[in-house]
Image (cartoon, helix red, strand yellow):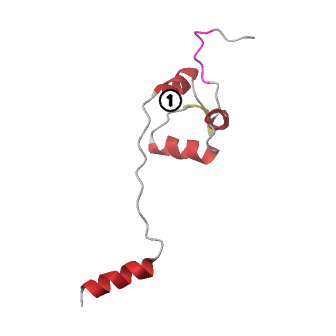
Amino acid sequence: MSRSPSDDSPSISPEQFAARFGISRDTVYRWIKQGRLSPVAIGPRVWRFRPSQVEAFINEPKRETQYTHIDENPGTAWSNRNEVNR
């Protein structure tokens, strides 16, 4: 049975979604938990994405990643702070 182009039934598993975009399955489940992705529940603990949801994900604007600077040598940062207070 082939799918028609208008068929938008939930058919893409989170694992298939992850493979399609080259991301981990854990990332897909994290995005579901964060509300970034909204799969359809088709049974207990069984989720599927509609093809239109995948298409919408492809077309959504890229989000900018915010990075937090972490000092590679915290002892130096601590020392500098102490020297300023002397």
Q: Which residue is mark 1?
A: 57
Magenta segment: 5-10
Q: Residue at x 68, y 12 (%)?
A: 3
73 displayed left or right of 46: left
Where is residue 50 shown, x and y percent of the image?
57, 24
Q: Is residue 37 visible?
A: yes
Q: Secondary structure at mark 1?
A: helix
Q: Quadrant of the N terminus?
A: top right
- Magenta residues: mostly which secondary structure? loop
The tally of labels here is 1
Which residue is most to the left?
85
**Magenta-span inclusion, residue 6:** yes
Q: Quadrant of the C terminus?
A: bottom left
Q: Residue at x 40, y 59 (%)?
A: 68
Residue 26, above or below 16: below
Residue 86, above or below 5: below
Where is residue 35 shown, x and y percent of the image?
45, 40
- Mark 1, Cα crowd under 10 Å, few <14 / some 14-19 / many 20+, is some
Which residue is most to the bottom?
86
Where is residue 60 shown, x and y percent of the image?
45, 29
Residue 79, above or below 43: below
33 displayed left or right of 6: left
56 displayed left or right of 8: left
Place residue 81 in its image quadrant: bottom left
Where is residue 40 shown, x and y percent of the image?
55, 30
Amino acid carrying mark 1 in the image: Phe
Q: Nearer the viewer, residue 39 or 63?
A: 63
Q: Is residue 44 visible?
A: no
Q: Residue at x 72, y 11 (%)?
A: 2
Q: Nearer the viewer, residue 85 or 25?
A: 85
Place residue 47 in its image quadrant: top right
